[in-house]
């Protein structure tokens, strides 16, 4: 941080010369009415092409886990039918997270997992 002594004159920066009463040229263009077009989510958010499947599945799993926690915390603040609906959504997010985890495991098995799994007995 630059310190000024009492005897040094302070120089004005470009920001000090701005007149806030006058709108800038870009603001003038923004005021002009134009046909309103709503962008879709796919037009705003995109996934970079070429990202490997394991990374995509990992990020999906992380997002679902975060969604699960957010919904569970929010549901704790509600009562009645609203809480029941939110807990149903939370359950769908949890099941989807399990499905993504299993898809990730099927595509890219962990090297530390045993090759032969014991049979499932009911």
Image (cartoon, helix red, strand yellow):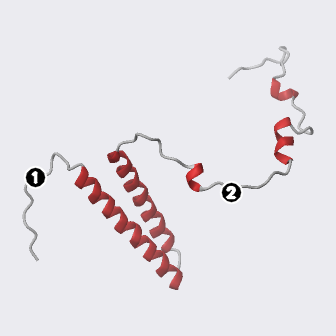
Query: From the viewer's perspective, is the residue at label 2 or at label 1 nearer?
Result: 2
Q: Does residue 79 lie above or below 97 as drawn?
A: below
Q: Label 1, on which residue?
A: 114
Q: Residues under labels 2 and 1: Cα distance?
A: 51 Å
Q: Is the residue marked by circle 2 packed among few (<14), some (14-19), or many (20+) residues within 10 Å?
A: few
- Res 55 → quadrant: top left
The residue most toward the right is 21
In the drawing, what numbered circle is on residue 93?
none
Counting labels gives 2
Q: Does residue 69 lie above or below 60 as drawn?
A: below
| CB-based contact (under 8 Å), mark 2 and mark 1 | no
Q: Secondary structure at mark 2?
A: loop
Q: Residue at x 7, y 63 (%)?
A: 118
Q: Does residue 121 lie above or below 60 as drawn?
A: below
Q: Residue at x 40, y 71 (%)?
A: 92
Q: Which numbered disc, 2 or 1, marks the residue that appears first in the sequence?
A: 2
Whole-percent x and y of residue 40? 61, 56
Q: Is the residue marked by circle 1 packed among few (<14), some (14-19), or many (20+) residues within 10 Å?
A: few
Whole-percent x and y of residue 1? 68, 23
Q: Secondary structure at mark 1?
A: loop
Whole-percent x and y of residue 17? 87, 27
Closer to the camera, 73 or 88? Answer: 88
Whole-percent x and y of residue 12? 84, 22
Q: Does residue 36 lie above or below 46 as drawn?
A: below
Q: Label 2, on which residue?
A: 38
């Amino acid at each position: 941080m630059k310190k000024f002594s009492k005897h040094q004159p302070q120089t004005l920066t470009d920001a000090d010369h701005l007149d806030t009463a006058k709108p800038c040229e870009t603001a003038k263009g923004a005021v002009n009415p134009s046909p309103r077009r709503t962008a879709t989510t796919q037009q705003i958010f995109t996934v970079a092409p070429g990202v490997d499947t394991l990374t995509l599945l990992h990020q999906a799993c992380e997002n679902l886990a975060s969604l699960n926690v957010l919904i569970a915390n929010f549901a704790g603040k509600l009562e009645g039918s609203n809480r029941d609906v939110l807990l149903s959504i939370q359950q769908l997010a949890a099941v989807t997270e399990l499905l993504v985890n299993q898809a990730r495991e099927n595509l890219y098995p962990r090297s530390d997992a045993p090759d032969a799994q014991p049979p499932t007995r009911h």
